[in-house]
Amino acid sequence: MRRSTLDPYEDRYARRVFGMRSSVMRDLMAITQRPEVISLAGGLPNTGAFDREVLASLLEEISRTDGARALQYGPTEGIRGVIDVIVDVMRTEGMDPDPANIIVTTGGQQVLDLFARTFLDPGDVVIAEGPTYPGVVPCFDAVQADVRHVPLDEDGLNPDLVEELIDDLAREGLRPKYLYTIPTFQNPGGCTTTLERRIRLVELAHERDLIILEDNPYSLLRYEGEPVPTLRSLDQHERVAYLGTFSKIFSPGVRVGWIEAPRPILARINLMKQAADLCSSTFMQLLVTSFFTAEDGAMWKRWVSDLNVIYRERRDAMVEAIDEFFPSEVEYTVPQGGLFLWATLPAAIDTTDLLARALEKNVAFVPGAGAYLDGNGGSSMRLNYSAMESDRIREGIRRIGETANEALDLARTLGLDGER
Ligand SMILES: Cc1ncc(COP(=O)(O)O)c(C=O)c1O
């Protein structure tokens, strides 16, 4: 059946293709790379601050001493050196994984894709936070999943609401295949699930036979408050699979992440990864290994603490600017770490429309609708503060605030405020 005349190949594609939407972040990337645009849209870590001499010497060392291996295929599960580094990083975060339970992946993003393809048939239910990570949207779309959101609040994910949803689903004769959550410095919500809730979530997973995929790229980027144990570290019953990544603590350009999971799940993920890419880049795994073993691990820890000083200052700049320039009705999270803040404007404002106008003023953010698969989030936005210097952040927020105030004035003039 022909669906449109624009694409001559349209009658050949698999059905799943037609349900796929691009992640908003990806769509915006082309626009936001223009130098005149102040982008508060991406999730770009501050790679500009990384010492070029250090990078050059790490690469040179690998090329000279391990060049043949760097240029070669590697095992699907990853090279031993980087797996040992992963074990160290996870220990830093209070976990004690078995190296045999780890597969190195092409970024954490690949875990989201492999996990969805391993567990979800078309129509299968998966539970996700509302809002959820915009980058997972294409993964769920690709497998035609039925995504049910559980709304977040300032204390993160509420296990009681998860339990209610499981009960509701059971009444419909449905069972969620897994729960996908980002408990620490949630992207995009900026909130962190409290310890009490984490303990209950893990207990609930055990009681209700629920698998949890814990996505944790940000917890080492904490610049305030005390660390909260990961769900994985609280799990005594092999209910939690864990996603980690080097993107935010080293570089997203290396595309190295990992999954740590119960052995039977891992065996399935391994097969799925063989189909996807055989193995992740050996060269980049060696680079990660060199950086994370340099100075006995002191070098990467110094880098992360330097980043945290920068991010904290930028977060403060953003919060201050929002207070000054946004409509007074705005509600927003003040994250204690991570890269994002989530702001919600009055319901009369549609942030997808607002983005079009903001782009005319050369400023970008991620509209909230991109973080939901059920059409919610229309008056919210995700704002990133890691990628721009404080004065640019302030100017960006000033322009978005101006646009929002104009939109709100217009809505009031037309009597549309308070309608939706
Ligand atoms: C919550 C979350 N999960 C996964 C990823 C994927 O990261 P990467 O593939 O770079 O490891 C990101 C990136 O921003 C993220 O924010």
Image (spheres, helix red, strand yellow):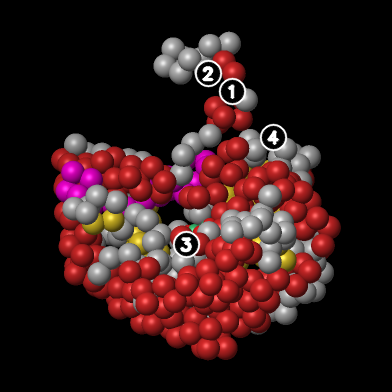
Residue 203 screen position, x and y as percent: 75, 69
Answer yes or no: do the residues labelled 2 and 1 have beta carbons within 8 Å? yes
Q: Quadrant of residue 138?
A: top right
Is 209 situated above or below 286? above
Task: Report, in whole angstroms, how far the alpha carbon at label 4 lies from the one at label 3.
Answer: 31 Å
Describe residue 224's horizontal placement relative to residue 28 as left or right.
right
Is 235 situated above or below 296? above
Looking at the rendered structure, the kind of residue marked 2 is Glu
- Provide the residue designation for mark 4: 122
Disc 3 or 2, which lies upstream in sequence?
2
Who's the residue at 44% across and 76% down the image? 57
- Provide the residue designation for mark 1: 13
Range shown magenta = 359-377
Task: Report, in whole angstroms, how far the alpha carbon at label 1 lies from the one at label 3.
Answer: 31 Å
Task: Report, in whole angstroms, how far the alpha carbon at label 4 lies from the one at label 2.
Answer: 20 Å
Residue 248 screen position, x and y as percent: 47, 68
Q: Quadrant of residue 213?
A: bottom right
Decide: few, some or many residues near mark 4? Use Cα within 10 Å; few <14, some 14-19, many ≥20.
some
Disc 1 or 3, which lies upstream in sequence?
1
Give the SS element for disc 4. loop
Task: Report, in whole angstroms, how far the alpha carbon at label 1 lies from the one at label 4.
Answer: 16 Å
Looking at the rendered structure, the kind of residue marked 3 is Pro
- Provide the residue designation for mark 3: 252
State yes or no: Cβ of the residue under disc 1 lies below 8 Å from any atom of ligand 1. no
Task: Report, in whole angstroms, how far the alpha carbon at label 3 lies from the one at label 2.
Answer: 34 Å
Does any portion of residue 47 appear in the rendered image? yes
Disc 4 or 2, which lies upstream in sequence?
2
